[in-house]
Amino acid sequence: MSGQRGDDLEDDFVPDELVASSGEEDPAEFDHPQGAGDGIDALLSADEEGEHDEPAPKGKASVAKRKRREKEKERQAKRRKRAETTEVVEPPSVAAQPADKLADYMSAMQAKAFPDSTALERNDIHIPESAITDTTQWTESRSLDRLVDFIIKVLPILHKRLSQRSKSPGAPTLLFVAGAALRVADVTRVLKDKRLRSDKGGDVAKLFAKHFKLEAHVAYLKRSKIGSAAGTPGRLGKLLCETDALSVSQLTHIILDVSFRDAKKRNLLDIPETRDEIFKMVLGAPKVLEGIRQGKIHVVLF
């Protein structure tokens, strides 16, 4: 191209549409005052600015095309506005129900864990309403960043015990049951809060199978005085049912992390694997079940 400027064109010259939109314009055109700001931004916004720069379309087909384009822009603008103003409303946590409703809920979940059992057989492992703590006084979020305040306000006896020195190795006051290793790690950090442990409270055990062999946890529990333990149902269940390393002699509370939902919007008891492990190996562990029936161990849904 010769570098001829737009001002040198003849008055009746009409640029070829295909060439003008081909993206191979003369570099000199970008020096023209009317071309300032052209480039990729101008191409991306062509639908918006082109209507002002080009002559009005002629013919019924062009008019209809322009109207369709305008309507599509309006629809896109409405969709963007809806996306900006729509708030994601999380369903209320099942844990916010009164104790009698929670007892019914736990019975229904237990029946799913033992689909081939009779009502009489399930009655032998039933979690009574008296063992389920009523937490309806807590009306705030049941997210992890509120767990410490939840324990302080709703579970004052547990709060007091967590701040006391542990008496025996591997004998926590609290078991916190979460569905996955990453969630357990997050819970462990929260339970280390000084508002719960003060300066005398015991260690916080982190118990899940990922990266840790069962033997390593057994050795750790036998030498460590812990005040609380957070773990997955599978690892807690094995420690309770297959070893003597995790003692229930000081256990007063088991918290089930039912308000947290995974990527598929399932809570701890919605997932068949974790539900089965909880009812068969954690709550169903002989010593735990005995403590629940005697009123020594309380089940809390958080």
Image (tube, rainbow, N blue to C red):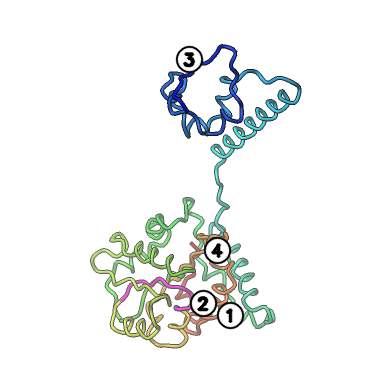
**Label disc, if present, on residue 7 of the rendered structure:** 3
The label on residue 217 is: none
Circles 1 and 2, Cβ within 8 Å, touching? The answer is yes
Tell me the element at label 1: loop
Lower position in the chain sequence, tag 1 or tag 3: 3
Q: Nearer the viewer, mark 4 or mark 1?
A: 4
The residue that disc 1 covers is 125
The mark lying in front, picked from 1 and 2, is 2
Residue at the disc numbered 4: 267
Q: How far apart are marks 1 and 3 (CA)?
A: 92 Å
> Which residue carries the number 2 mark?
283
Lower sequence index among marks 4 and 1: 1
Q: Earlier in the sequence, mark 4 or mark 3?
A: 3
Which residue is drawn at the image coordinates 56% and 74% (left, top)?
Answer: 273
Quadrant of the rendered structure where residue 108 is?
A: bottom right
User: Is the residue 275 above or below the residue 89 in the image?
Assistant: below
